[in-house]
């Protein structure tokens, strides 16, 4: 494959998926600027591997794994070099983690709740529900078992329910509440 063809294919891939990747990165880290950086680093890794990966159709899985790996590297680096963010919950125009149709208050509540999950729970929720991956794909991307994905999803969803709707009481059909 000639370099110009390779670059054209890679550019088309990036244009089609970049916004979704930035959104996933944002939900993983909670900072739109870091999300852009994480996405850029993951795409750089993909570009280097494009001759191997792009020809076999595994580019989506590769870039998702790269995004998670870059996030882990970023987390480790920041753990050694803590910094103080300017604003924990600043309003951002064109928010990459925005959910279509949700109000600004709902989006803010969801972001705040996601940031209260553990790192592993947040990764599983973002991959499973934001990127709409199967349990098996999520397990492969995170290098964990499918059972781990299922248990982390269950714990994360239970925690999100408590955080987002603390007064909600689920009802079972036929059950009486006196």
Image (tube, rainbow, N blue to C red):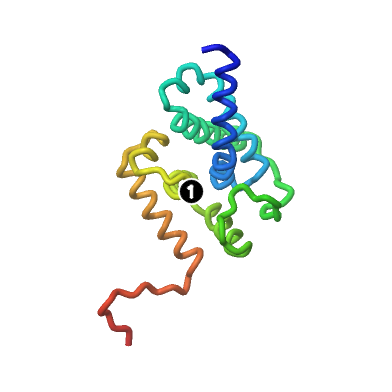
Residue 51 drawn above or below residue 61: above
Q: Which residue is mark 1?
A: 130
Q: In this view of the protein, which residue sits in the foreground, 119 or 164?
A: 164
Left or right: 162 as drawn, with respect to 147: right
Please state the horizontal and vertical placement of residue 100, each as a whole percent of the image: 56, 56
Residue 166 drawn above or below residue 64: below
Left or right: 149 as drawn, with respect to 161: left
Q: Residue at x 41, y 22 (%)?
A: 56
Q: In this view of the protein, which residue sits in the foreground, 39 or 116?
A: 39
The residue at the far right in this view is 86
Residue 6 drawn above or below residue 12: above
Residue 4 drawn above or below residue 36: above
Q: Element under label 1?
A: helix
Q: Residue at x 42, y 57 (%)?
A: 157
The number of numbered badges drawn on the structure is 1
Q: In this view of the protein, which residue sits in the foreground, 41 or 148?
A: 41
The residue at the far left in this view is 174
The residue at the far top in this view is 2
Q: Residue at x 59, y 25 (%)?
A: 44
Q: In this view of the protein, which residue sits in the foreground, 40 or 159?
A: 40
Rendering quarter of residue 32: top right
Crowding at label 1, few (<14), some or many (≥20) Cα neighbours within 10 Å? some
Quarter that holds the C terminus: bottom left
Please state the horizontal and vertical placement of residue 61, each as a whole percent of the image: 44, 32
Please state the horizontal and vertical placement of residue 162, each as a whole percent of the image: 46, 65
């Amino acid at each position: 494959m000639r370099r110009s063809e390779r670059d054209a294919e890679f550019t088309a891939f990036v244009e089609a998926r970049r916004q979704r990747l930035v959104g996933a990165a944002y939900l993983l880290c909670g900072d739109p600027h870091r999300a852009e950086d994480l996405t850029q680093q993951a795409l750089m890794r993909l570009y280097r591997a494009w001759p191997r990966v792009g020809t076999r159709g595994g580019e989506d899985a590769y870039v998702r794994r790269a995004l998670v790996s870059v996030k882990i590297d970023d987390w480790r680096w920041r753990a050694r070099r803590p910094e103080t963010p300017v604003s924990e919950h600043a309003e951002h125009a064109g928010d990459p983690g925005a959910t279509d149709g949700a109000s600004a208050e709902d989006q803010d509540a969801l972001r705040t709740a996601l940031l209260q999950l553990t790192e592993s729970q947040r990764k599983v929720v973002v991959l499973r529900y934001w990127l709409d991956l199967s349990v098996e794909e999520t397990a492969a991307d995170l290098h964990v078992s499918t059972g781990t994905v299922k248990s982390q999803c269950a714990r994360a969803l239970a925690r999100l329910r408590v955080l987002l709707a603390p007064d909600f009481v689920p009802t079972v059909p036929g059950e009486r509440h006196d």
